[in-house]
Image: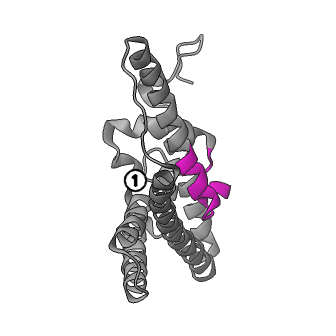
Amino acid sequence: MPGFVGHTIGNTVVLAGTMAYMVSQGWSTADILATGTGVALATVILSPDMDLFNSRSMKEWGILRFYWWPYAKLVKHRDGMHVPLIGTFVRWAYNLVLIALAIVPIAILLRRVGFSMTFKGETDDILWYLGYLVDAFVGATLADTMHYVLDVTTTHIKTRLIPRKQRERYARYVQNHYDHDHRLPMRQQSLNYKGERE
């Protein structure tokens, strides 16, 4: 795997190429910025490596990385959620569900105290802004595609060029890295009846 720096360089190329293409085709500035934002989000905040609890992308979240802990626990690194479009959709859906779970109780509480919010716009306004969300999603999918291509090609190169003994050592390292990144933090681990950490 190319690592955080390699993925960032690859996605910077995607960002520059996508924006240059959109400018040459006469897309609006708002569409170009929305697509570029999607690429940036998928590179730093919504990376396919969010399934590694101690990855660089995860560390960018700081204390909020516990927000991603359930996702990292459920998803094995480089499985189906690493595939572009599918993984992009699942990570975005994960965020939307958790945001909705946070907003709905607040909205109910505000309504109980007499505060109500109404939307006075038209359906066209909603569709107009959803278009920018689609642009951002397309940008994120392009970034995830580059991430996937870099992972596959570097893995293929490593398996062809690196001797078998070193590949086995690397496989053990990767497994240990996976085991380390998917366990609970020490404070959250429970003790068994013998007083040992589980």
Q: Which residue is drawn at the image coordinates 42% and 81% (left, top)? A: 22
- The residue pinned by badge 1 equals 45
What percent of the width, then of the height, locates residue 138? 52, 67
Percent position of residue 48, x then y? 52, 57
Q: Confirm whether the magenta stretch covers residue 6.
A: no
Is 127 left, or right, of 76 in this rendering?
left
Near-viewer residue (11 or 155):
11
Looking at the rendering, the stretch of residues picked out in magenta corresponds to: 75-93
Residue positioned most to the right: 80
Which residue lies at the image location 44% right of the left edge and 56% below the top edge? 129
Against 55, is 194 above or below? Answer: above
- Residue 42 in sight: yes
Viewer-proximal residue, 186 or 138?
138
Q: Position of residue 89 (x, y in %)?
A: 59, 54
What colouring method underlies this structural image?
Answer: one colour
Q: Quadrant of residue 88?
A: bottom right
Q: Quadrant of the C terminus?
A: top right
- Image spot of residue 189 (x, y percent): 50, 23
Residue located at (40% from left, 29% from top)? 117
